């Protein structure tokens, strides 16, 4: 997310408390504002439209539909986002802007195809095996596809560093959704859960349309070079593994606990574990500020050191390269330590607030017994993700793959074991998986530091590699001068 650092430095550089708060707010806007806006809109609709007066079955159906829409929209976007982001960054660096729209259309086609492959069979089964009405099923599917489009177009606006517009579009879409839900319920007396689902679907669609129109306005020309995009997936398939493994690891422990005694089946189709899922949500929000802290500090401090090292490599002396390299890795270590230190303080404070006030809001019992272990797991998880980003900086895809796959695998296996323990230790699968990924990523960064010179200066080839008939081993014919022939004679 290079680009916001200049603005953050300008804000924090004034040194006042008000400007520091402004800088934190700006960092929040470019990282988690869309998620906060969506959750806040759902809460407002629930409060002002009488959601608590609905029956138990209706509320569970709406909650399960929204849960599945968000989880699987994120999962189906994961295999494509990292490769497309790499492609678009390279194209922008090379100033070949005509190649961006082929990337956009190709990725959109692939993302929609995978989303439909998962969504259509599920919706057909939901309609056939349950008594859910067809219009509700279809609206839920439309909301799912609309959110897929939102997440997909967000990628391009993020690379263009247009974070403010992303937040504005989300705010506009959710404001529109709130108004639609209010009109449907209060004016036309439409059933509440369907009104809320339809309103959210329309809000997501409006957000997606605004994002897509902005992308098309930025990049008006199309080179029609679509094959180049597919070649990038072949070349950078490791990015597919990394992003998919990390995203799947975020939810794989939930999937494991969906098959325990906490399981709830809604409409004979939706499987979930509300108690564990709520504890997961609380744990994530306890540590979500790590994302804000990491982006702020990396953009303000580390990115500048990385830039100086890159400039030294391309045009500096050997001593300059060594000096900038040492400063860069010292800054990397400093940022990781600062992230752990600051986030630990914030997490402890938020944890204490949660423990004190959540019982007054109706959250108690099993949820609060599961919550502490999950909170520790997400604390480690966000630090691990910071290390993965640093591995991206140094193009160490092998280390990133090792980290993501180990994190996902160990989390899955650990959750299978921890579900048989007491409720206090249900989150140990996430803790162990995150710690495994954190440890591997740390040692991989140390390895990169030792071998960075080889990676930078010894990766190229003198002659282009090609397939074909092997040339003859004879290089040249040696001609013997006549004087030497006469002498030997």
Image (cartoon, helix red, strand yellow):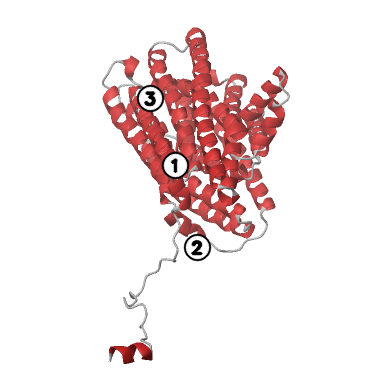
Q: Is residue 312 visible?
A: yes
Residue of label 3: 273
Q: Could you tell me residue 327's position as x and y percent?
A: 54, 34
Q: Residues within 10 Å of mark 2 (few under 14, many from 20)?
A: few
Is residue 353 positioned above or below 204 on the image?
above
Closest to the observer: 268 or 157? Answer: 157
Q: Could you tell me residue 228's position as x and y percent?
A: 51, 61
Please give left or right for residue 420 compared with residue 434 in the image.
left
Q: Is residue 31 visible?
A: no
- Element at label 2: helix
Q: Earlier in the sequence, mark 1 or mark 3?
A: 1
Q: Could you tell me residue 12's position as x and y percent?
A: 69, 26
Residue of label 2: 227
Q: CA distance from mark 1 to mark 3?
A: 25 Å
Q: Could you tell me residue 103's position as x and y percent?
A: 55, 55
Q: Nearer the viewer, mark 1 or mark 3?
A: 1
Q: Quadrant of the N terminus?
A: top right
């Amino acid at each position: 997310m290079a680009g916001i650092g200049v603005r953050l430095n300008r804000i924090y550089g004034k040194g006042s408390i008000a400007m520091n708060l402004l800088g934190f707010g700006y960092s929040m806007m470019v990282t988690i504002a869309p998620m906060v806006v969506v959750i806040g809109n759902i809460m407002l609709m629930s409060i002002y439209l009488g959601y608590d007066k609905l029956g138990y079955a209706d509320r569970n159906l709406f909650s399960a539909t929204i849960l599945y829409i968000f989880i699987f929209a994120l999962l189906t976007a994961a295999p494509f986002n990292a490769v497309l982001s790499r492609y678009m960054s390279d194209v922008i660096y090379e100033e070949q802007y005509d190649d961006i729209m082929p990337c956009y259309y190709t990725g959109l086609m692939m993302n929609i195809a995978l989303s439909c492959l998962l969504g259509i069979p599920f919706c057909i089964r939901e309609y056939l095996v349950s008594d859910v009405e067809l219009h509700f099923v279809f609206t839920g599917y439309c909301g799912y596809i609309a959110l897929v489009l939102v997440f997909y177009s967000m990628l391009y606006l993020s690379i263009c560093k247009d974070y403010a517009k992303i937040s504005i579009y989300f705010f506009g879409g959710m404001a529109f959704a709130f108004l639609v839900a209010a009109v449907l319920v209060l004016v036309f007396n439409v059933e509440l859960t369907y009104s809320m689902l339809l309103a959210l679907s329309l809000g997501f669609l409006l957000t997606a349309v605004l994002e897509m129109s902005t992308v098309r306005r930025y990049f008006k020309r199309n080179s029609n070079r679509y094959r180049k995009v597919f070649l990038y997936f072949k070349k950078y398939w490791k990015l597919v593994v990394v992003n998919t493994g990390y995203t799947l690891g975020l939810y794989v422990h939930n999937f494991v606990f969906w098959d325990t005694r906490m399981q709830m089946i809604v409409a004979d189709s939706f499987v979930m574990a509300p108690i564990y899922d709520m504890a997961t949500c609380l744990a994530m929000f306890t540590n979500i500020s790590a994302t804000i802290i990491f982006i702020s500090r990396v953009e303000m401090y580390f990115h500048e050191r990385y830039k100086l090292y890159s400039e030294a490599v391309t045009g500096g002396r050997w001593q300059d390269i060594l000096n900038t390299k040492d400063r860069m890795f010292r800054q990397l270590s400093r940022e990781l330590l600062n992230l752990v230190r600051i986030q630990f303080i914030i997490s402890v404070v938020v944890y204490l607030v949660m423990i004190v006030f959540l019982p007054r809001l109706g959250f108690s019992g099993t949820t609060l017994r599961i919550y502490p272990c999950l909170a520790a797991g997400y604390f480690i998880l966000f630090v691990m993700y910071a290390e993965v980003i640093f591995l991206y900086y140094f193009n160490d895809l092998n280390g990133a793959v090792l980290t993501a796959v180990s994190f996902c695998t160990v989390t899955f296996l650990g959750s299978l074991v921890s579900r048989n323990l007491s409720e206090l230790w249900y989150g140990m699968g996430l803790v162990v998986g995150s710690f495994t990924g954190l440890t591997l990523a740390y040692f991989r960064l140390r390895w990169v530091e030792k071998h960075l010179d080889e990676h930078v200066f010894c990766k190229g080839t003198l002659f282009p590699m090609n397939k074909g008939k092997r040339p003859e081993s004879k290089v040249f014919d040696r001609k013997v001068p006549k004087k030497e022939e006469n002498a030997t004679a």
